[in-house]
Amino acid sequence: MSRRFSGLLLILVLALVVALGFWLSKSAQEQRVVPTAQVDPEANQFFAEDFVVWSMDASGQLKYRLSGTRLEQRQGDQSSHVESPVLIMEHPPAPDWTLRSERGWVSSGGDEVQLLGHVQLDRPGAPDHPPMTITSRDVTVWTLPRQAHTNARARMVTTHREAEGVGMTLDLTRDTLELESQVRGTYVPH
């Protein structure tokens, strides 16, 4: 019996050694696994200072040029927050439009730009296109349909006319400006 007992004891010790080895290897493996950190969606993925971004469409044509004093791209939704943005949109055959604001937000794909706070839109003069300045607040720009819109009061000034109203849509493709309500204007013949 002692031989049987010795064999049984040996099997039991071997089983304990195997179980202990398995447990130790699993514990060591768990310690090697680095826990994934929770991503703060508001944390910056990167930032740039005194920057210029050239955004192209699918065919490689320039959609717009965006510059500013600081750009911060968020980790969560890949959107960007911009300080003192200057957005330049081409408007052939007329001169380019320059849009400025206090701060801004750009969607992850760059198709929507929100110009926040005081906003000024300028187009220099050219033959058949008088200079134009529009002032407003909180303007949303859609870069592919090439439109800008606000629900706030907007004021437009050109060489011989002035107009203001509440709500505005500027369509660069159709070359139109629409003031939506409470519109007043002045035209000075020349």
Image: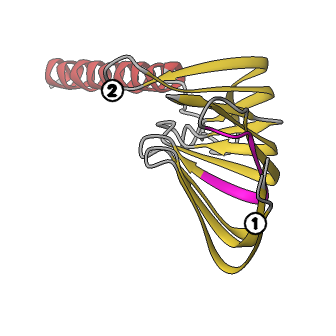
Disc 2 secondary structure class:
helix
In the image, residue 152 lies in the stretch drawn in magenta: no
Q: What residue type is labelled 1?
A: Ala
Which of labels 2 and 1 is toward the front? 1
Magenta part of the protein: which range? 129-140
Above or below: residue 35 compared with residue 115? above
Using the numbered discs, state the Cα–Cα distance from disc 2 to disc 1 in whole angstroms: 85 Å
Q: What residue type is labelled 2?
A: Ala
Residue 169: image x %, image y %? 58, 61
Say few, some or many: other residues with alpha carbon within 10 Å of mark 2 (under 14 / 14 to 19 / 20 or more). Answer: few
Say few, some or many: other residues with alpha carbon within 10 Å of mark 1 (under 14 / 14 to 19 / 20 or more). Answer: some
In the image, residue 133 lies in the stretch drawn in magenta: yes
Residue farthest along the front direction in this orientation: 190
- Asked whether 45 or 122 is in front, the reply is 122
Q: Is 182 placed left or right of 20 in the picture?
A: right
Whether tag 2 and tag 1 are in contact, CB under 8 A, the answer is no
- Asked whether 38 or 13 is in front, the reply is 38
- Asked whether 39 or 94 is in front, the reply is 94
- Residue 52's disc is none
Q: Residue at x 80, y 60 (%)?
A: 188
The residue identified by callout 1 is: 163
Note whether residue 157 is visible. no
The residue identified by callout 2 is: 19
